[in-house]
Image (tube, grey):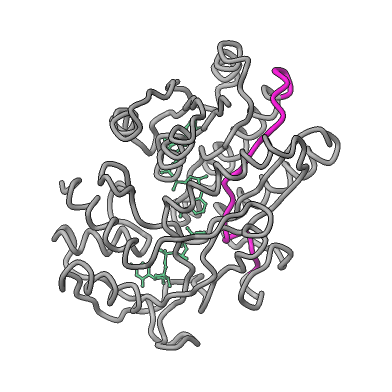
Amino acid sequence: MKILLTGGLGFIGSHTAVDLMERGHDVVIADNLSNSKIEVLDKIKQITGKEAKFYQIDICDLDALDKLFEENKDIFGVIHFAGYKAVGESVAKPLMYYENNLISTFNLLKVMQKYNCKNIVFSSSATVYSPKNVMPLTEDADLGASNPYGRTKLFNEHILRDFQFVNPDYDVVLLRYFNPIGAHESGLLGEDPNGIPNNLMPYICKVAVGELDHLNIFGNDYKTKDGTGVRDYIHVVDLARAHSLSIEKIIREGRIGFKVYNLGTGTGYSVLDIVNAFNRVNGDLVKYEIAARRPGDIDECYASPKLAEEELGFKAEKTLDEMCKSSYQYQKNNKK
Ligand code: NAD
Ligand code: UD1
């Protein structure tokens, strides 16, 4: 089937493009390169031996999106990755986040209706859950985002739910990612944020290759087994597969309606678990110091992955060691 990936040259989108293409689907990518590089397109081709059709467009440009659909009337479904994702930046520039992350969805839904394309998978996040929930998080846990980025995800979820309610012939799948890390085994695709990374694994990788001196561990007095924050890290290659499984469930079942799935492993690892695994697998490369807590961080966050397993047949397979190894491999290949 022909699948449109908005933001398909980004970290998760590029891995999903590979997975879909390896399963025999045709992939069309729309990306404005605001947080990705055109070289990724060639890397996807190197891995799969196939070419994805590429449009360098902004999804907020309704005419450009319309033209894409006009030229690809047979798009079966859309996986909507495109969006800004940095929490700190969203606090500093809320309008930029609301505009990009919401207008893109409005445009997509309008154009999908015009061209009778009835299936959409949306990149949501564990950040939509209220911090007050008990772990593990099930899909019916309380919602409540605490920063503009998180609110764009929550608003998008509401928009898509309301849209599907009055358009029951549409299939809408919300995928709530936990903490995606790791990289493709080829070493060609991975995550390479601009500037100093905010998130743990990209920061660790930059310390490991000598671009940063040491890791600051944000707090060691959380209510966790070793005092450092616990999260549910999932390999991006596993995560990518869950998108293909969502699309294939729609293809197989014909109509699935409105669905929400957590994508995590169900296992929580602490910051120290990650640092220790990384050093064990890659050599003793990462020094750390204990620093103050980062505002807004919570003790623990991990998924109940049961629903995705039961309904999508999705189970994360890759280990923490594989996540650490592949992340470092990619960083070494992309050393500045
Ligand atoms: P990414 O920044 O690597 O990829 C997003 C891509 O979208 C980039 O290639 C960017 O150039 C493109 N883009 C942004 N705005 C666009 C627009 N208006 N028009 C066209 N292209 C546009 O991010 P990612 O890590 O691959 O995340 C993909 C999605 O998953 C995002 O929506 C993100 O919020 C969500 N998500 C990511 C994480 C994570 O930890 N990486 C966790 C939960 C949810
Ligand atoms: C981040 C996002 C969140 C998103 C989630 C999943 C932020 C503030 N939040 O949350 O919106 O849904 O990823 O992708 O970006 N840590 C350190 N030192 C560092 C960096 C992180 O100790 O330099 C710790 C954090 O305190 C946390 C853990 O590492 O305990 C993971 O942090 P991070 O990778 O930023 O992910 P989340 O906080 O889960």
The percent coordinates of residue 308 (x first, y second) are 63, 57
Q: Is residue 298 left or right of residue 327?
A: right
Image position, residue 128 (x, y; %): 63, 59
Left or right: 209 as drawn, with respect to 17 = left
Give the image quadrant in which the ligand numbered 2 is located.
bottom left
Q: Residue at x 50, y 73 (%)?
A: 267
Report if residue 29 lies within the magenta region: no
Position of residue 2 measured from the top left corner of the image (x, y, whole percent) = 56, 25
Boundaries of the magenta span: 113-130
Task: Work out whether 334 lies above or below 132.
Answer: above
Count numbered badges in the picture: 0
Locate residue 2 relative to residue 181 in the image: left or right.
right
Q: Is residue 325 above or below residue 1?
A: below
Q: Residue 135 at what x, y percent from top left? A: 61, 76
Kindly identify the residue that appears in the image at 33 percent across and 79 percent down: 272
Q: Is residue 200 above or below residue 133?
A: above
At horizontal 50% and vertical 55% (from top left) the residue drawn is 91
